[in-house]
Image: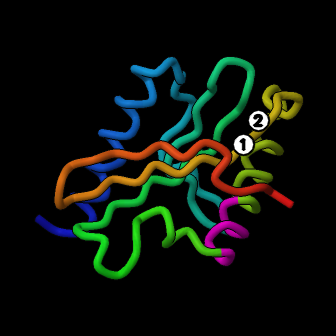
Amino acid sequence: MDTRTRGREAEERARRYLAAHGCKLLCCNYRSRRGEIDLVMQDRDSLVFIEVRYRHSADFGSAAESVDRHKQARLVACARHYLQAHPRYAQLPCRFDVVSVNGSDGSLDWIRNAFDAG
């Protein structure tokens, strides 16, 4: 299985997991010139921008650890673009979550408020 297929499967698994925990899907793979947000969901009264990371193993760090400052900055810029394009959500509190999918044991870890936009 190639990397893109694994990535799509991880995103779909994360989407199902989050939906089962009460999140409502608004958008998948939102793209702007600054990057891409895997999932945009609403969790109660909050707008949530979600980065899904898959790692076959944690030998070189966890999937969540791979969301470095550079990636965070790109996600924040893309989220700002999303809010400009969808002003009806601009008044909601926003947060950035990371869903880490571990390929070796199939575990999934949802990290709420993984980082700040600041």
The magenta span reads: 69-75
Number of residues whose C-alpha sits closer than 10 Å to that of mark 2, classed few (under 14), some (14–19) or many (20 or more): few
Number of residues whose C-alpha sits closer than 10 Å to that of mark 1, classed few (under 14), some (14–19) or many (20 or more): some
Q: Is residue 52 above or below residue 84?
A: below
Residue 57 lies in quadrant: bottom left
Q: Identify residue type, mark 1.
A: Arg
Q: Identify residue type, mark 2.
A: His
**SS state under label 2:** loop
Residue 104 lies in quadrant: bottom left
- Quadrant where the C terminus lies? bottom right
**Residue holding disc 2:** 86
**Residue holding disc 1:** 95
Q: Residue furthest bottom?
A: 60
Residue 12 lies in quadrant: top left
How far apart are the alpha carbons under marks 1 and 2?
A: 16 Å
Answer with left or right where residue 65 lies relative to residue 60: right
> In terms of depth relative to the viewer, which is nearer, 8 or 113?
113
Q: Is residue 105 magenta?
A: no
Tell me, yes or no, whether the two marked residues, 1 and 2, touch with CB atoms within 8 Å. no
Q: Is residue 74 magenta?
A: yes
